[in-house]
Image: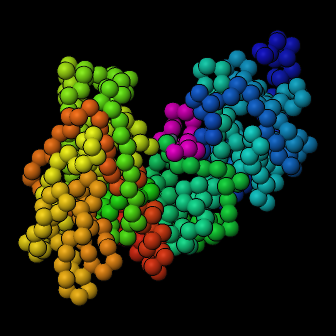
């Protein structure tokens, strides 16, 4: 509801009181407080989910103040109010209590903190308690973004369990904490146009607020307090993902930019993660068309380029009207990252058999060092000898990408395609057969857990998956 002229005049009186109070408060250095270090801005609601009004509550009341230079400066104390209403009035975000206006312009920088914020007080939005405070950023369409100002370490408390379950070993949780802290620092300002740094979901990093905190995960944050990954003196983008399927990827093989610390490495610690997904050519065409890429009636699909780490760099779809090439991670964004779980896949025909039969060899090991063996559907090389010195290939992995060598315990080893091009699938049905889950760049969480279970430290885990980095 827009303010009438009388209401507006009333609000001006209230406002002048605030201006007076704030100047009083800003005058004394004793009342300038910064709790818990530098604050970052987390977007809780923005875009389509941004509200036009909401209720904020806090058990001990509030402080209205200003967030600047990373610290909170107390302005107007509001200990008598435990519930406040934030709503749009014209293009202004207003703050009121039971219809009484407290501020008619919660412009950027104004921040609502719990009155007892210095003692760990919490502020509630939509029934969820948050550490730090809240601010509101007016949109052009009559809604406002809800932003949580929270110190970095306390932000990570609300991230860790959501990104790696608290039941995992402490060293894995610590590795995750350092990666997430570096990723956060690198990504600050990602949503600057919307008035905050990172959003609270998978686009940036999942953050649940105080309700998502657990003793085990808080301990991992505290145990690595302030520690980040640096490469050549710069903080790194600590990318992480679920499962490598046996090999991580170079950043430029998945996205576009090459980073010296995001190098693909053979990952002997990765637990098995097999997936497959089928889609008829007709459906595939419809889905491509929905992305503006209709190739006409599809006649064949092939993997036409693959990275040294085994990931698909180009998927070529030949149709009656045109040829479409999906490159790198775009394969997953166009076809669905929950369906094409990783770029480490091969294509099989309608019968489920391998479409192509490329020769395989293990990356980093000389093929000539092993015995050539006819595998199930291609030429394979033994890459490791068993404890008794025996050498045998027990099976070719799904889709010919993976060589499983008998060596006491069976072990999946990443294998690389030889020069032979992979055959196109033309049977009207496409069967993706793959390994791993996620973009494949940086720290594989499943491997971090496996390494921690084997007794590795978080420094060793991070050193394995980020190349040439220092932890400090
Ligand atoms: Zn985001």
Q: Is 192 contained in the magenta span?
A: yes
Q: Residue 458, percent across and down? A: 47, 73
Q: Residue 81, percent across and down? A: 89, 40
Instruction: Name the residue rendered at 61%, 25% in the picture.
Output: 139
Image: 100 above or below 129: above
Q: Residue 19, percent across and down? A: 78, 34
Instruction: Name the residue rendered at 14%, 53% in the picture.
Output: 358
Indicate the quadrant where residue 66 lies: top right
Residue sitting at the far bottom: 388
Instruction: Name the residue rendered at 82%, 54% in the picture.
Output: 116
Q: Is residue 162 visible?
A: yes
Image: 200 above or below 274: above
**Is 360 left, or right, of 330 in this rendering?**
left
Instruction: Name the residue rendered at 39%, 63% in the picture.
Output: 272
Residue sitting at the far top: 5
Q: Is 392 contained in the magenta span?
A: no
- Pick the quarter of the image with the C terminus: bottom left
Which sits in the foreground, 142 or 106?
Answer: 142
Q: Which residues are magenta?
A: 189-202
Image: 311 above or below 270: above
Image: 186 above or below 171: above
Which sits in the foreground, 228 or 24?
Answer: 228
Which sits in the foreground, 214 or 148?
Answer: 214
Indicate the quadrant where residue 196 lies: top right
Secondary structure, magenta segment, majority class: loop
| Figure coloring | rainbow
Residue sitting at the far right: 80
Q: Is residue 25 visible?
A: no
Q: Residue 18, percent across and down? A: 81, 34
């Amino acid at each position: 509801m827009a303010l009438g002229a009388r209401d507006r005049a009333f609000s001006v009186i209230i406002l002048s009181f605030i201006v007076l109070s704030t100047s009083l408060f800003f005058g004394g250095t004793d009342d300038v407080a910064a709790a818990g270090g530098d604050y970052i801005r987390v977007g809780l609601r923005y875009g389509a989910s941004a509200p036009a009004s909401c209720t904020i509550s806090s058990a001990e009341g509030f402080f209205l103040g200003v967030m600047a230079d990373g610290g909170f400066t107390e302005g107007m104390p509001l200990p008598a109010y435990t519930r406040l209403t934030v709503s749009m009035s014209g293009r202004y975000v207003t703050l009121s209590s039971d219809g009484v206006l407290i501020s008619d312009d919660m412009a950027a920088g104004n921040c609502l903190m719990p009155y007892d914020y210095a003692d760990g007080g919490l502020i509630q939005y939509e029934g969820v308690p948050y550490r730090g405070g809240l601010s509101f950023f007016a949109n052009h369409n009559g809604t406002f973004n809800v932003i949580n100002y929270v110190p970095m370490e306390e932000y990570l408390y609300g991230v860790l369990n959501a990104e790696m379950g608290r039941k995992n070993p402490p060293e894995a949780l610590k590795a995750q904490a350092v990666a997430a802290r570096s990723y956060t620092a690198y990504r600050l300002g990602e949503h600057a146009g919307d008035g905050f740094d990172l959003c609270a979901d998978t686009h940036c990093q999942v953050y649940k607020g105080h309700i998502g905190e657990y003793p085990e995960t808080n301990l991992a944050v505290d145990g690595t307090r302030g520690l980040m990954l640096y490469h050549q003196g710069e903080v790194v983008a600590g990318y992480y993902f679920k499962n490598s399927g046996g090999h991580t990827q170079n950043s430029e093989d998945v996205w576009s930019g090459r980073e010296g610390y995001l190098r693909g490495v053979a990952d002997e610690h990765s637990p098995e993660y097999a997936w497959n997904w089928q889609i008829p050519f007709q459906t595939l065409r419809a889905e491509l068309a929905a992305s503006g890429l209709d190739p006409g009636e599809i006649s064949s699909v092939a993997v036409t380029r693959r990275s040294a780490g085994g990931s698909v760099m180009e998927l070529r779809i030949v149709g009656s009207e045109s040829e479409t090439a999906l490159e790198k991670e775009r394969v997953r964004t166009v076809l669905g990252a929950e369906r094409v779980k990783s770029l480490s896949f091969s294509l099989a025909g309608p019968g489920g058999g391998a479409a192509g039969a490329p020769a395989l060899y293990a990356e980093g090991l000389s093929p000539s060092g092993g015995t050539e063996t006819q595998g199930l559907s291609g030429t394979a090389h033994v890459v490791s000898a068993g404890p008794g010195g025996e050498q045998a290939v027990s099976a070719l992995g799904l889709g010919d990408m993976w060589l499983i060598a008998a060596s006491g315990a069976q072990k999946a080893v990443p294998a690389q395609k030889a020069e032979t091009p992979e055959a196109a699938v033309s049977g009207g049905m496409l069967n993706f057969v793959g390994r791993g889950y996620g973009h494949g760049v940086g720290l594989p969480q499943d491997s971090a857990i496996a390494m921690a279970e084997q007794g590795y430290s978080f420094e060793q885990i991070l050193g394995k998956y980020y190349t040439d980095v220092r932890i400090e």
